[in-house]
Amino acid sequence: MTMEAEAAGLVRKPGDLIGKVQDKIIRKKRCSNSSRRKVIIRRSLRPILGLQQLFLSCQQVFKGPGTVPSPNDVQMLCHILDQMTPQDVGLSSDLHFFKPNTDVKAHERVAYATIHQCKKFSLCIFFLPANSVIPLHNHPGMTVFSKLLLGSMHIKSYDWLDNSSSDNHESDPKLKRLARLRANRIFTAPCDTSVLYPTSGGNIHEFTAITPCAVLDVLGPPYSKDDGRDCSYYKDSPYDATLDVEVKEAKQDECYGWLEEIDLPNDSEMDLIPYLGPQVSVAS
């Protein structure tokens, strides 16, 4: 447990009953004698079952690098995620971190907690303090499901306009490339799950927290530098067809931007914190 996580209210204290099965013992006198009987009341199992259902479905859906889930599988995962609540991962809007107008000085950076990770997929939660930013970044060869659990955030996303230019980009990573704007709006929980694919759906996106936010991400396969799935970061600049060189693939009714690869900004590093919510059972 980190001091930063505790200060932000991202971890449960011993008395908390958030998203976890607890047994409450009530001792009740019997009329016939002085002996006492234990009556066990169990809290709802839904938080554990919701996360477990997601985990088991991911085991079935994600086949490993080089594969993309079928439309039916995407629909199934979206259906599961759309029904998930903060309590499914042990969170509550009552936590100090998510209270409005709360100054969390001890935890100003974005944090993340890993629920589960294997070679085929990973489940993780990102915690964004108000006004924090996860800059434009890509997801090479990955399908990603993002479920905003708490808060409001602005999401901007792009797809490369011409993937055939990847050879030139590999020889000069700093070369500006034209990208099609896919999203540029505010999302507020609860909202539908967003999905991005290896070459579509807004594979390059940026999160800007308007309020403190929690985002549940499902990545298949997860990032792996050794397997060529390292994360790259970008800055964007406007594309103006009247000023820039005309690109034949560009359409008048769509928006575009020039993306240039950059190093990870110093103020964009993230903190890893423990995940203390309901656990998944990996037993087959």
Image: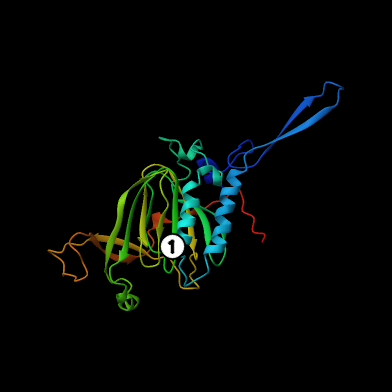
Q: Which residue is drawn at 50% across and 41% down?
A: 8
Of 117 and 201, nearer the camera is 201
Q: Residue at x 31, y 76 (%)?
A: 164
For residue 213, above or below residue 68: above
For residue 75, above or below residue 100: below
- Residue 69 is situated, as x and y percent measured from the top left of the image, at 47, 65
Image quadrant where residue 116 sits = bottom right
Q: Which amino acid does label 1 sit on?
A: Pro
- Residue 12 is situated, as x and y percent measured from the top left of the image, at 59, 41
Q: Mark 1 points at which residue?
A: 71
Q: Is mark 1 on a helix, strand or loop?
A: helix
From where the camera sits, is residue 182 visible? Answer: yes
- Residue 171 is situated, as x and y percent measured from the top left of the image, at 33, 78
Q: Which residue is drawn at 53% across and 68% down?
A: 63
Instruction: Determine the residue located farthest toward the top in the rendered image.
Output: 31
Position of residue 277 in the picture relative to residue 243 (left or right): right
Of 75 and 210, nearer the camera is 75
